[in-house]
Amino acid sequence: QKTAYEIPKRDWSSDVCSSDLAEMFLGLGIDRKVVKPVVLALPYGGQHLGMVGVFEDWLIGKIGWQEPGIYVDKVTRPCIWLARHFGWVLQERMDSALAFRRWAREMVKAVLPKTQSPIEWQSPSGWPMRLGERSTDEICVRTQFFGKVRMMTLHESEPTSQLSAIATAKSASANIVHGLDAAIVHRMVEACYANVSWLVTNHDCFAVPWFDAPWLHRTLLATFRKTMEEAADGLTLGIQADADRKGHQVSVPLPVFGEPEDMSEVGSNPHLYG
C-alpha cells in the first residue's frame, strides 16, 4: 500500500516523454491492485521484464486490446517506462527484500560449489527443507510438422548430474520464503485445532466462525512474528550446522536485511492478514 502511495509522488521529469506518460498512468490510477503482484514477486526474484508483463496486462484491462501495429507504442513502451520508474521506487522502499534475495544467492554460491551436496535445514515448524538444483544438458529434438523439419531445444537434468549453484540460486529466495510460509500455516493449523470449533484453510488464507475471528487475527500476527524472529538467526545456523555435520569446511554468510530493525515491530501491522 505504501508503494502505491509513493508512485504518484515521484518526480517524473527524468526523460522527455515523462509528463505525457505520467499524466496517462496517474489518470488511470496506480493502486494497490496493480502494485501488489510486483511487490510480492520481488523477494522471489522478480525482474524488470516480469514487471513489464504485469503492467501490460493491467493497461490492456484499462484501455482495451490494441492492434498489433500500434501495440508496441500504446502498451509495451509505456509499460517499460513505468517499470523503470517503479523499479527505482522499489529499490528505495524494499531494500530489505532485495538484500534478502542477494543474501540467498550469495549463500548458495558460497556453499554449494564446495559441498556438492544439497543445502538442508529445518523450517521453524520442524519440517526438513532442501535446496539443490542439478545441472541441465541441452537436448535438440528434431521432428517433422506437416512435412517441415522442426527443432526444439529441451533442458534435461540427470539424477547423477552435478549440483548447479547458478540454477539453485535462481529459486533460493522463493523456496526459502515458501518454507517460512509453510511453517506459519503448520503452526496456525495446530493452534486452531486446539482453540476453534472448525477451520477452513487455503494456502495462507484462513476461515473460522465469526466469533473466533478476533482470536484468529491476533494469533496470525503473533505466529508471523515468532516465525520471523526464529528465522532471522535459525536459517543461517541451521545451514551451517548441516554443512558441519556433513564434514564440509564452509562459512555460511550472515544475512543482511537492509537497515537493522527491531524484531518486536514484526507482525505489529494491523493490516497484515486483514
Image: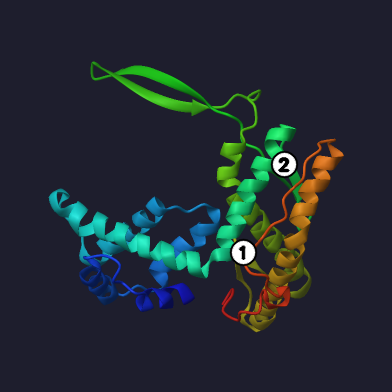
- Residue at 68 percent of width and 78 percent of height: 265
Q: Is residue 213 visible in this depiction of the protein?
A: yes
Question: Where does the image place residue 181, in percent across and percent down from the top left?
Answer: 64, 60
Which label sits on residue 264?
none
Q: Would you place residue 249 above or below residue 199 in this image?
A: above
> Which type of secondary structure does the marked residue at label 2 adopt?
strand
Calculate the distance from the C-alpha at mark 1 to the C-alpha at mark 2: 30 Å
What's under tag 1, amino acid-wise? Thr
Could you tell me residue 183's position as x and y percent?
71, 59
Classify residue 191 as left or right of residue 201: right
Q: Residue at x 39, y 57 (%)?
A: 51
Q: Residue drawn at (55%, 44%), measured in percent from left and top?
A: 170
Name the quadrant of the C terminus. bottom right
Instruction: Choose mark 1 or mark 2, whichever is in front.
Output: 2
Instruction: Specify the quadrant of the image occupied by residue 15.
Output: bottom left
Residue at 30% in and 21% down: 150
Q: Write down the residue under mark 2.
A: 119
Residue matched to label 1? 201
Please say if 209 is above or below 114.
below
